[in-house]
Image (cartoon, rainbow, N blue to C red):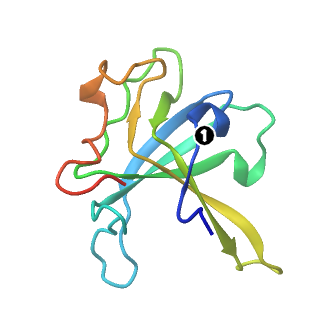
Amino acid sequence: MAIQGALPVAFATVFPAGAYALGVEAITDFETKRPQLDKESGLPLWAVDVIDADPEARGKAKSVKVKVAAEVCPTLPDEVPGLPFRPIEFESMAVMPYVDDNGRRPRVAYSLRARGVKAPGADAGAGAGRRSAPAGAGKDGA
């Protein structure tokens, strides 16, 4: 099969109404208790807790985690006065389908990944201090 691994996808396809970050934390390997590493890049993985701004999103689809491979913890965009969350965009997003067999019957689920975070509307050059370390820092990109 020609397609292997994660499928590239635009941020606006995944979050057409935008997204809000709640926080970010390191992903720890359950067995080794060490930071989990991205299989492609070897960089540590970070989980950004996200709320989908789509008013139609319900249940599990309303709150998701986006994995970011980066040498250092991604820095979230600044808070916006009057909003309880931080508006966020992800750079170079990808979707990894997998089979979730934890329920009564197996279903296809998706893991979301990104190479960095930024404030909404910030271009690649602006807000560089708010983005995670470049995916290429240290080793290969995610």
Residue 115, by quadrant, is top left
Residue on which disc 1 sits? 51
Q: Is residue 28 left or right of residue 136?
A: right
In-front residue for pair 3/27: 3
Residue kind at label 1, given as amino acid type: Ile
The structure residue drawn at horizontal position 19% and vertical position 48%, both measured from the top left corner, is: 137
Q: Residue furthest left?
A: 138
Q: Is residue 66 left or right of residue 42?
A: right
Q: Residue furthest top?
A: 81
Q: Is residue 113 left or right of residue 37?
A: right
Instruction: Rate crowding at label 1 as few (under 14), some (14 to 19) or many (20 or more) other CA atoms within 10 Å.
Output: many
Pinpoint residue 14: horizontal percent, then vertical percent: 64, 40
The structure residue drawn at horizontal position 71% and vertical position 54%, both measured from the top left corner, is: 60
Q: Quadrant of the N terminus?
A: bottom right
In-front residue for pair 19/15: 15
Pinpoint residue 109: horizontal percent, then vertical percent: 69, 64
